[in-house]
Image (cartoon, rainbow, N blue to C red):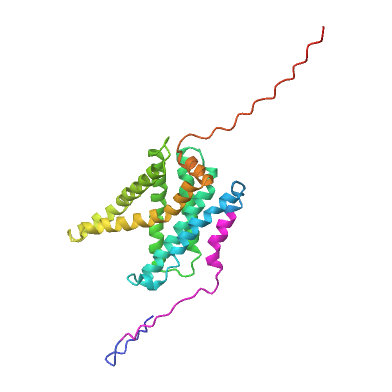
Amino acid sequence: MVAYADLGGLGAKQGAPVVSDWVAPSAIPQLLPWLGILALLLLKPNRCASAWWILVPLACVGGVTCVPQSALEFMPASALEMFLELISALGFSVAAVWLVSSYLSWRHRMLAFGGILLALGAVSSLVCLVRQDVGREMLQLGVFLAASVPVISVALTLAGLVCRGRYGWLRLTLWLLAALAVLWLLVIGPFFLVAMISNRGDVPLGALFAVVGVATGITFGVMLPFLVLSFANGFYRERLKGLLHLGGAVAPPVIAPPMAAVPEAAGG
C-alpha cells in the first residue's frame, strides 16, 4: 500500500510503500472445494475404497500451492498468487471430472466432451468465486481459466480420438501433450499477431512460444498426476478408458441358465 496526497511543492506526492499480508477472516472458503470433492466421493459409483485414491493427485497439485514465496522470488507477489490460484482451480476441476466420469463412460464422444467441459468450467468457477478478494488479478485468472477449460476438454477428446481402439499410457500422454501445445498455439497466436501488427513487428517470435510453453506446462502439469493415477489404478484406468473410448467396452459376464433336471429313466 502507498499513501498518496498532493502537497503541491511541499514534498513528494507518494509516501513509502508499506507491505501488508492480508489474511482471510475465515478458513471456510478454503475448505469448500475439499467439501465439494467429498460430496462427489459420496456418489453411488464412488462408494468404494479405490475412489479415494483421487486424493493423492489432488494432494500433489495442492502441494504446489504451498510452495513458500521465498522459493519463487523471481515472480511478483500478484503473479505468484494468481499462478497458485490457477493451479488450485484446475486441480479441483480435473479431480471432479475423474469422479463424475462414470456417468460419461462409453457415451457418445460429444456427450462426454460436453460433460468434461461442464465439470471443468463449473468447478473451476466455483473455486475462484470462494476467494475473498476480487480485483484485476481475479479478472486475469478468470480469463486464463476461460481459455484453459475448453483447451483441456478438446485436448482430452482429441487424444482419445487418436488413440481409439489402442490403449497405451505413453501414447496417450504424448498425444495429450501435443494436443495441448497445438491448441494453446491456436488460442494465443491471434493475440500475438495483433500485438505484432500494433507494434510494427517489434514483438519477438520467441515470446509467442514462451507463452505457449508456459500455458502448456501449467495445464499438462496439473493433469499429469491424475493421468498417473489412471495408469496405476485399475478403478480409474477403466474410467479413463470409458471416458475417452480407449479400447472396447467390457462386455458383462454371460451367465448360463441353469440346466433343466433330466428325469431318470424308469428301471426295467
In the rendered image, the vertical position of residue 69 relative to residue 150, given as above or below: below
Residue 117 vs residue 44, the one in the foreground: 44
In the rendered image, the vertical position of residue 125 relative to residue 176, given as above or below: below
Location of the C terminus (image quadrant): top right
Residue 210 point in image, percent of width and height: 27, 58
Residue 182 vs residue 228, the one in the foreground: 228
Asked if residue 251 lies left or right of residue 224, the reply is right
Residue 42 point in image, percent of width and height: 61, 52
Taking the view exactly as shown, the residue that stands out farthest to the front is: 268
Asked if residue 14 lies left or right of residue 133, the reply is left
In the rendered image, the vertical position of residue 163 relative to residue 36, given as above or below: above
Q: Residue at x 35, y 83 (%)?
A: 17
Q: Count numbered badges in the picture.
A: 0
Residue 27 point in image, percent of width and height: 55, 70
Q: Is residue 38 magenta?
A: yes
Location of the N terminus (image quadrant): bottom left
Q: Is residue 223 magenta?
A: no
Q: Residue at x 45, y 60 (%)?
A: 61
Taking the view exactly as shown, the residue that stands out farthest to the bottom is: 10
**Region in magenta:** 13-39
Residue 15 vs residue 179, the one in the foreground: 179
Residue 199 vs residue 77, the one in the foreground: 77
Q: Residue at x 48, y 67 (%)?
A: 131
Q: Residue at x 32, y 50 (%)?
A: 181
Residue 96 point in image, percent of width and height: 51, 52
Asked if residue 52 lies left or right of residue 241, the reply is right
